Image (tube, grey):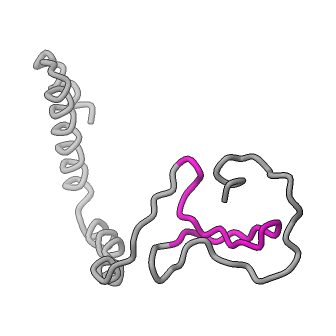
Amino acid sequence: MYEWLCGNELDIEDATQGNFVAIINDTLQYPGPSHNSKRHRVRNNLPGTREFCPLIRRTEKLDRFIGMNLSQAAIDHIGKTHSDLLSRATAFLLLKDSKASYTIEGETPPHNRIERWGKII
């Protein structure tokens, strides 16, 4: 773990015996893809990189949502939506987001700038 997190190799001998042990217990948390470290006899299944590694506790509620396969349902619905409607909805959401950003920043852009941005998107 230390070597992976810090990027510094410790001056210790490589492990040569024993089974590989997973870092994340997948009954308690959601693991990432697994990569074996032969040097440490560890299965690195942390969900991310050393710069960003979000650990998510496994719950029944999250498992139910995952079981609902919502990403596929969204893909199916988007596939059935006319492309013009989808483009208009996307443009509307981007425009609302831009207006919210100006509000957060305390700026008041010229009205024609918002109109031009709306036409572009």
Query: Is residue 16 rendered to the left or right of residue 9?
Result: right
Q: Which residues are magenta?
A: 31-51
Which quadrant of the structure image shows residue 80? Answer: bottom left
Q: Give the percent coordinates (x, y) of residue 43.
A: 68, 73
User: In the image, what residue occupies the spot 24% across and 48% down?
Assistant: 90
Q: Quadrant of the C terminus?
A: top left
| Residue 47 is covered by the magenta coloring | yes
* Residue at the image point whose x is 85% and y is 71% from the top: 15
Q: Quadrant of the N terminus?
A: bottom right
- Residue 74 location, x and y as percent? 29, 69
Closer-to-camera residue (63/77): 63
- Number of disc labels: 0
Q: Give the left or right position of residue 111, taking residue 85 as reference.
A: left
Q: Residue at x 89, y 62 (%)?
A: 13
List x then y, in percent, for residue 84: 22, 53
Hey, which residue is sitting farthest front in the picture? 12
- Percent position of residue 67, x then y: 35, 84
